[in-house]
Image (cartoon, grey):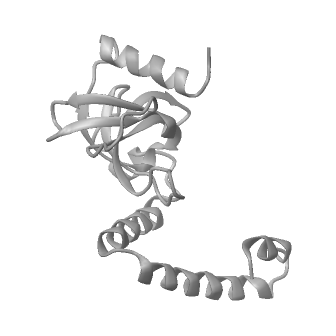
Amino acid sequence: MEPQDWIKRKNQRTSVQALVCEAEKQEKKMLQTMESREVFDYMISKLNFCKRRLAFSYKEVQGHYTLRKGDICYIDFGQAYVMEIGYLHFGLILAFCHQKAFVVPMTGKCREDKEYIFPLGQIPGLYKESYLFLNDAKWINTARIIDIKGHLDPEAGLFQTIQKSVVRCIGVK
């Protein structure tokens, strides 16, 4: 049965158990088609979700540090569709609002030179050159943040340029 068919049956009690069985069956099939590294990332992300899903912020799961605008963090972005950032990646915090952080995902691998990819170069605290995926910037619950790995000064020109680039990427004049 397709997800939209399950949605139509949402209020029927008997459909929940059948849905769980179907989802587990589909997940097993999916895992068999994935490379071992992707299975590892998927399972770590799933464990993080199980542990952190009810946390309102990072303080409930990782309260020993203070997050700041400009921090470069290791983040669990969760499941992703094709062409979205997912699982565990670095990300730059641009802003905070009500226990959420607006982050721009990062990668150390970049095969293309596109307007939505911002080259950062070598950042202190990271071991290779980094790139920002401007088109994947989004609000996240700070409970998704695993650790702080570096920092960019929010008053510096680089940070200001990144902010302007994100705004331009999302189409705000």
| Residue 20 occupies quadrant | bottom right
Where is 15 relative to 59, above or below? below
Tell me the residue at 84%/77% (across/down). 9
- Asked if one can make out residue 14 in the rendered structure from this viewpoint, the answer is yes
Q: Is residue 137 above or below residue 38?
A: above
Judge by depth and name the residue closer to the eye, 79 or 132. 132
Q: Quadrant of the C terminus?
A: top right
Is residue 80 found left or right of 147 in the rendered image? right
Image quadrant containing the N terminus? bottom right
Viewer can see residue 100? no
Q: Left of 141 or right of it: where is 5?
A: right
Q: Quadrant of residue 18?
A: bottom right
User: Where in the figure is residue 152, as x and y percent of width and height?
Assistant: 27, 24
Q: Nearer the viewer, residue 11 or 110?
A: 110
Residue at 16%, 40% (x, y): give it.
128
Counting from the top left corner in percent of width and height, residue 135 is at 50, 36
| Coordinates of residue 36 in the picture (x, y in percent) | 31, 75
Left or right: 38 with respect to 56? left
In the image, what residue occupies the spot 16% across and 36% down? 125
